[in-house]
Image (cartoon, grey):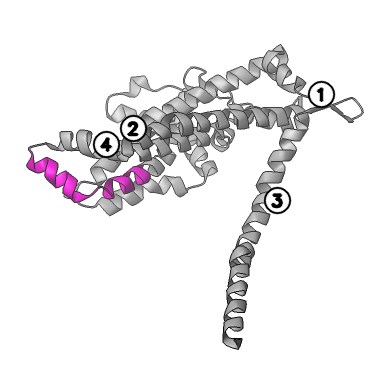
Amino acid sequence: MSTIAATEEMAEDLAGRRGWPLHIVVFLAPAVLVYSLFSIYPLIDTIRLSLFTTDEAGLYHFVGLDNFGRLIGDPTWSGPFWNAFRNNLVFFAIHMVVQNGIGLGLAMLLSLPDLAGRNLYRTLIFLPTMLSVVIIGFIWQLMLSPLWGVAETFLGFFGLGGYFGPWLGQETTALATISLISVWQFIGIPMMLIYAALLNIPDDLVDAATVDGAGPFHVFWQVKLPLIVPTLGIVSILTFVANFNAFDLIYAVKGALAGPNFSTDILGTFFYRTFFGYQLQVGNPTMGATVATMMLMIILVGVLIYLFGVQRRLQRHTF
């Protein structure tokens, strides 16, 4: 009887332990605490601050959604906001087409089994990603300078010197130029993600398609590409989130005013000037929090469209 009672006590003790996994709480507590302190709390407080305004005495007054109405409809705020939003769309579109397109092509080349020196190529292409954005911006400013830059001489070597211009100083070309600089720096990220997806494709599928008479192009188009579509979706949504959070490269190259004449202004630089102020512009924390909340909403809408509009269709085709 004592043995049975001891067994029942052990079973109850194990059941109690299973119902309260203390070790999991201990291991997760530091990460949850840090994440809550530096991510969740600032996010909630930013949303709260966007619902207030300040008077001349610096006192806060609750105004609800009035700040969002001012941001979208008031000419003082709506003009810069929609300009920054349009520039952000262009910034994102260039990264989607150029960065991810070239990244896909580079990943295809690196996945070729007969390519010599692939490890060296992969390292060199990924190397700019690990450099500081400030260093990247400073180097490209020097190279593209019409006074002492090497870009004009380099193009002249190929007979294209007549096409050189002060691209960073012209309203029509400044945003595209900075976008291409960003593409050059971060092209290694989509390349590595797609390259890893290509390596995970079973060789049996490729061999079977080759035996059936499919060439390299048809093997990629009919076999490999459908299998890496989920990875391409992840790369796209990561590009979207990163570009609508972008700030550092444009600030390093063109400053907070995002010149010339705000032609390179995106939501990140617009938020910076609104919240902290710059030169003659006085900082407005409540409107800055409103801009930050709008950025959050735009990113959430984009992510939700991907999750419920794209990923669900991919799962249907997968399963």
Q: Tell me the kind of residue under disc 4.
A: Leu
113 or 254, which lies in front? 113
- Where residue 245 appears, x then y in whole percent? 57, 35
Q: Which residue carries the number 4 mark?
A: 225
Q: Tell me the kind of residue under disc 2.
A: Gly
Q: Which residue carries the number 3 mark?
A: 37
Q: In the figure, is residue 51 to the left or right of 303? A: right
Return the mark for residue 63: 1
Work out how far the residue at label 1 is from the one at label 3, CA to CA, in angstroms: 27 Å
Q: Main secondary structure of the magenta part?
A: helix
- Local packing at callout 1 (Cα closer than 10 Å; few below 14, some 14-19, many 20+) is few
Mark 3 or 4 closer to N-term?
A: 3
Return the mark for residue 101: 2
Mark 2 or 4 closer to N-term?
A: 2
Q: Tell me the kind of residue under disc 1.
A: Val
Q: In the figure, is residue 116 to the left or right of 60? A: left
Quarter holding the N terminus? Answer: bottom right
Going 62% across and 57% down the picture, which residue do you hit? Answer: 31
Asked which quadrant contains residue 10, the reply is bottom right
- Where residue 221 appears, x then y in whole percent? 22, 33
Label 1 or label 2, whichever lies nearer to me, is: 1
**Start-end of magenta stretch:** 191-212
